[in-house]
Amino acid sequence: MGKKVVIVGGVALGPKTACRIKRLDATAEVTVVDKDEFISYGGCGIPYYVSGDVQEIEGLMSTSAHVLRDPRFFKNAKGVVVHKQTEAISIDRKEKTVRVRNLVDNEEKTLAYDKLVLGTGALPFVPPIPGADLPGATVVATPRHAIDIKEKIAKGQVEKAVVIGAGPIGIEMAEALTDLWGVETTIVEMLDQVLPGPVGKDFAVPLKNHLEEKGVQVLVSEQVTKILGSVETGVTGVETTKTTIPCDLVVMSVGIRPNTNLAKAAGLAIGATGGIIVDEMLRTSDPDIYAGGDCVEIMHQVSGQKVHMPLGSLANRQGRVIGTNVAGGRATFSGTIGSLCVKIFDMTVARAGLTLKQACAVGFDAVSTVVSQADRAHFYPTQEMMCMKLIADRKTRVVLGVEAIGVLGDAVKARVDAVAALLATKPTLDVISNLEVAYAPPYASAMDIVNSAANALENTIEGRHRPVSVDEFVTAFETENACVLDVRSAVQAGPYMKRYGERWMNIPQENLSGSDVAQMNRKPLYLICGSGPRSYEAQLFLRSQGVDDTKNVQGGIKMMQLTFPEYTTFDDDNESPH
Amino acid sequence: MGKKVVIVGGVALGPKTACRIKRLDATAEVTVVDKDEFISYGGCGIPYYVSGDVQEIEGLMSTSAHVLRDPRFFKNAKGVVVHKQTEAISIDRKEKTVRVRNLVDNEEKTLAYDKLVLGTGALPFVPPIPGADLPGATVVATPRHAIDIKEKIAKGQVEKAVVIGAGPIGIEMAEALTDLWGVETTIVEMLDQVLPGPVGKDFAVPLKNHLEEKGVQVLVSEQVTKILGSVETGVTGVETTKTTIPCDLVVMSVGIRPNTNLAKAAGLAIGATGGIIVDEMLRTSDPDIYAGGDCVEIMHQVSGQKVHMPLGSLANRQGRVIGTNVAGGRATFSGTIGSLCVKIFDMTVARAGLTLKQACAVGFDAVSTVVSQADRAHFYPTQEMMCMKLIADRKTRVVLGVEAIGVLGDAVKARVDAVAALLATKPTLDVISNLEVAYAPPYASAMDIVNSAANALENTIEGRHRPVSVDEFVTAFETENACVLDVRSAVQAGPYMKRYGERWMNIPQENLSGSDVAQMNRKPLYLICGSGPRSYEAQLFLRSQGVDDTKNVQGGIKMMQLTFPEYTTFDDDNESPH
């Protein structure tokens, strides 16, 4: 008789664990139960099903060879028994049994286990506001939600939609609704930026601008207080702290919580984040019960704190670790560095580690810098600009986080993944300065943006580089009558000088003279160039000439274009482009 | 009086060092001498100038803001004095002076230094064969060579070309000649594969196939013994160990050697690789003389051996380190992991660390595996297959190298860069199994190819996975009457069964039964599927059923298509595609 393994949860972690166990131990008797009608689906693909990129919902539940991963498939191809629409209702840890109920016929039975695996996932958080239960107000946690939304749209019942929450899912859903279906979509976010968890505000603004450019209205620092409508009419609109927005569909994506009801009732230890506590081998407080995926808390390898990090990619990797351990091997899962990437129409954001705010909150003396650079050698004919932010601890110079935005998604993700790979090793800035990413002109610069970002941050920490963000600069420009020295060519600076008058001055960097600038007698003087390096060089030169009170606008005109396009867009045909 | 710094060499390392010094110490008096007419150019861009991607040679010598980096620019924008066409002819280490000669007027002078930096680069190796000095036979080391080649082609003087050497430069040059100019090009490589340094033969074959598909003839295991022609006619052809090839142009790219004449004459220590010996701060055996770039040897962080690694990206990063140290700081350069990527028409290869052969040669008990996987979630509508090879030490399971080929270059490079970032930390396979590359369906699978490759190699080392390469499989199929069990669907396997008869059998993986296969009584039985995982699963299942003598064809049909397209191409309209 083989080892009896029961797995609760059949989405990502459960099936991965089951298959790994069978590969290592063909004699194991592995049973998966899931209360849902759908199993083994790519949850992260839901927005792409709604958008139509994935045409059939079965696409999310099929193998790469287009075979449907249904119970029959698991039986035949994997030797795993799957009971869907079957809920695990209690665990008897002493007897080592799980009581399950078939939700179709309400039949109950008891499954004995030698090892039990909990992959119970997470539950979408439904905001406690009136109307959240109206028809047309929905979360997007399962394929069923996606099917319902797509059907409603396909029937022509959705002209306007409101998405509550500007996290990755909310944004992906807004794109799906707008892009294929032409639904007039508004995102309402309570906090003061989009993607408040993943990135700092300096990158959130360009992303918000891009969403709006693509037709999605984005309201930040605004909270939905009520969903309007009735059971008969369904949703007719939302009321926010500032306004009323008519709509036919409300998508609530304000976060998810670990689903630990079963674990809690069984007396397993639950952490402060609300997730099940597991050790490095992903064992719960009961060594015969493993848990992983969206229902557990794991170590954040940069902050050292326990976090809830619900990502399909982590669940899959954890599933393999649990599978190995259940089969008698010894594998460990060290934690997460919080890698994430999101496609937002024609832009991509990728990130890992801690944001500046998060780093400060956990006690680091954190400092950051932003650089702009092309994703190819500057002489290569096709290229796109990327912006990268690096966050480090001032004293130890350990890199704590990385964020990047840009047009070519694979190139953006490449840079973040390379830095992210090292985060758990606590790399100092000089490691990233010399990080040996592969170089060829069609794919990178000799000094890649990852190297440049580390160099810039080192220069900042050493006090050589005195940066301001474009946000700080614009505030000073608007409220303090601040003056700019544009060190690009006269042709490039021309339109800005024309529009902004004597507060926007120009001396190309190679023509700078300390005495000329000293005569300007503007304090502080904001230095700007196309992307940052020339104005940094100008800052150093001016300091050597006794002009010390300068600030370098980080990311230069490129970051200005992304963040304050109204400052850098010229309608006048006489004004030259960049 | 500021510190006097003399830098010999003005291509990559020299200018970088000079500018970094001036940024840290505005008082330093920095002089760069270079014997060439061109300075501060992107040498890796030369093939892209020849191809026409970069239209003007000045593009390779300009800043990203399109300012020409000539001596005037260095003077005005950087405060650095550059003497071009000025050769350093000797160093007096006692007096701390360098004797230089202006190559235009032959005037000599002596420059005093407090610190001297050698960035003398490398010299192209000219094969010692008759005719190597004929007009039309050229190396490609400087912009001058590129200009001469492009002029000759533009004048219509080149119908056929031979490239000697199938390294990155040789291949890039072959692409440049073929793609834009339609020159009938043949690459002749002495060793038995293209890119013999960077990748194993299993990936070299697909790349060779792709070159040939694009019209470049590639001859391996063949040596050019003589270049034919006369001073009057110029090159008319080459003679190889096997044949004669008529041509009007011969590009010799058979490697480069550190240029250490000046260092040697000054008595500086030279290593076994022929490069100048430097310490971690990039000081030579004379602490007042630094060296870096293509003229030094550096530590290979995987093999622990000193290597010559002439790459512009390393030179730039080393230049910054030297600049910091010369200016009184303390920066270190730990070595290289040999990252490289090359665009070859519509394919890209990226690699880092050691190849299997190199790893075995330095004493590792190295083992490798190849996996094929899509670069996006399998349900995402657009995707390309990639193939990745991971090399590890059997005993310690430390990852020693990574190679990848595929269509979407940025995606291929992303995977290699993420693994490469860790190579110097000696990561074990389980680190790569759980490597947290960012996941979103438009850019990756939940279980990315880097994770899959590590998992597959772990399974191989543990003896669960018994792989053969497509090469070994085809040899067995052709010479030993080997039999295949194709575990894909009947539709997919159909054309193969029709063509190859009873030796190509089909049972879809989910329908496998041990007794059926045992009855076949074929030993060994080669298992194949689309990319490898299903046939691996089949191998495990069959073993559990007592059928033990099976081999899994690594990378499956995908690697077959890339490596032996003649096996997988079906002209018959009745045969279905993949």
Image (cartoon, coloured by chain):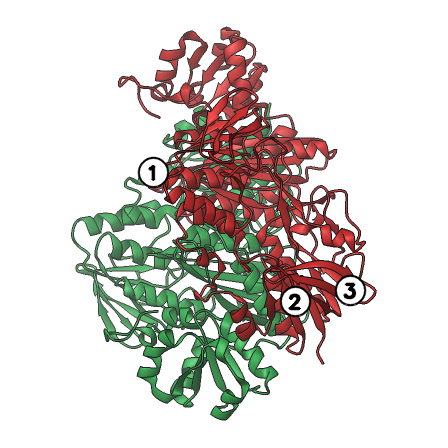
Chain colours: A green, B red
User: How many neighbours does mark 2 have within 10 angstroms: few (below 14), some (14-19), or many (20 or more)?
Assistant: many
User: Tag 1 or tag 2, which sits nearer the N-term?
Assistant: 1
Q: Residues within 10 Å of mark 3 (few under 14, many from 20)?
A: some
- A132 with respect to A71 (left or right): left
Place residue B429 in its image quadrant: top right
Say whether marks 2 and 1 touch (CB < 8 Å). Answer: no
Please report the residue visible at 76 percent of the width from the left and 60 percent of the height from the top: B91
- Identify the disc placed on residue B98: none
Question: Quick one: SS at disc 2?
Answer: loop
Tell us which disc is closer to us: 1 or 3: 3
Picture mark count = 3
The C terminus of chain A: image quadrant: bottom left
Residue B456 place in picture, x, y as percent: 57, 33
Asked if residue B38 shows in the view, the reply is yes
> Residue beneath label 1, please?
A59
Q: Which element carries disc 3, helix, strand or loop?
A: loop
Between B6 and A457, the residue placed more toward the observer is B6
Q: Using the numbered discs, state the Cα–Cα distance from disc 3 to disc 2 in whole angstroms.
A: 29 Å
Residue type for callout 3: Asp
Question: Where B425 sits versus B537, above or below?
Answer: below
At label 1, the amino acid type is Gly
Tell me residue A484's x, y (percent). Answer: 43, 83
**Which chain does tag 3 point to?**
B
Check chain identity for marks 1 and 3: say if they share one: no
What residue is disc 3 on? B288
> Residue A575 location, x and y as percent?
28, 75
As drawn, the residue found furthest toward the front would be: B232
Marks 1 and 3, Cα distance to the nearest angstrom?
65 Å
Q: Subunit of mark 2?
A: A
Badge 1, how many Cα within 10 Å: few under 14, some, many 20+?
many
